[in-house]
């Protein structure tokens, strides 16, 4: 499998991502001189990616990130690195980590890559919301009928926050999936 991220040629903004299923390299590939192999790989990669007019496709397989992790990246064009385009993650986002069973805030994380939920944790992107301003607050969400509210836990320490944040690795949920989450 090869993972390609596509960017607008005009301004380097992200457009989409795609996984392409490919066969392994032929047996003679290892005997090709390195300089020629790099040139051939670039041409082969471009043929696999099939960028549309006005798109630049970058093979991002070597990062080993899940599909969707480049949604906040941009492609910079400039003089650096021999005029090659440079992939950049310019903005950090803030994520709140909740225990799915108890709706308790158990950690916070800042990352320029998306963060994804799993079976035990619900990860919510709170960038640009009022929750971002209370980064580091612990507590539990509760509800009274249709109204949800937050009960702060003033017993948690900054050391516990740091330990919780270290346990959270960069993954993502889209806002639509976050809003569909249930406790």
Image (spheres, rainbow, N blue to C red):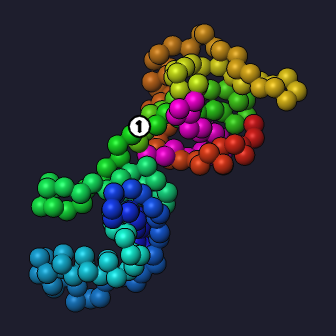
- Residue tagged 1: 92
Q: In which quarter of the image is the N terminus?
A: bottom left
Residue positioned 35% across, 46% down in the render: 89
Q: How far across and how far down the image is residue 7, in percent?
A: 38, 62
Determine which quarter of the picture holds residue 27.
bottom left
Please name the predominant secondary structure of the magenta segment in the image: loop
- In the image, the segment drawn in magenta is 113-129
Left or right of 106, for residue 49 = left
Considering only vertical position in the picture, is 154 above or below 54?
A: above
Considering only vertical position in the picture, is 140 above or below 72?
A: above
Q: Is mark 1 on a helix, strand or loop?
A: loop
Left or right of 58, for residue 30 = left
Determine which quarter of the picture holds residue 143.
top right
Magenta run includes residue 115:
yes
Residue positioned 31% across, 49% down in the render: 88
Tell which of 153 and 134 is nearer to you.
134
Q: Quadrant of the C terminus?
A: top right
Magenta run includes residue 112:
no
The residue positioned farthest toward the front in the image shown = 10
Can residue 44 be seen by looking at this rendering? yes
Q: How far across and how far down the image is residue 119, in percent?
A: 66, 46
Q: How far across and how far down the image is residue 51, in percent?
A: 39, 75
Tell which of 96 and 147 is nearer to you.
147
Q: How far across and how far down the image is residue 91, in percent?
A: 39, 40
Residue positioned 39% across, 56% down in the render: 13
Considering only vertical position in the picture, is 111 above or below 163?
A: below
Tell which of 158 and 129 is nearer to you.
129
């Amino acid at each position: 499998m090869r993972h390609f991220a596509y960017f607008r040629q005009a301004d380097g903004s992200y457009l989409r991502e795609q996984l392409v299923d490919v066969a392994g390299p032929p047996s003679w590939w290892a005997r090709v001189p390195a300089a020629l192999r790099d040139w051939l790989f670039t041409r082969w990669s471009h043929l696999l990616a099939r960028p549309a007019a006005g798109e630049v496709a970058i093979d991002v397989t070597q990062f080993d990130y899940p599909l969707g992790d480049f949604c906040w990246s941009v492609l910079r064009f400039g003089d650096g690195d021999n005029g090659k385009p440079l992939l950049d993650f310019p903005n950090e986002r803030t994520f709140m980590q909740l225990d799915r069973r108890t709706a308790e805030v158990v950690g916070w994380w800042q990352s320029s890559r998306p963060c994804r939920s799993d079976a035990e944790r619900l990860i919510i992107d709170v960038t640009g919301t009022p929750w971002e301003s209370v980064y580091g607050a612990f507590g539990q969400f509760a509800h009274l009928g249709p109204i949800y509210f937050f009960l702060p836990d003033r017993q948690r320490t900054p050391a516990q926050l740091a330990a919780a944040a270290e346990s959270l690795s960069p993954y993502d949920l889209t806002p639509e999936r976050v809003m569909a989450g249930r406790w």
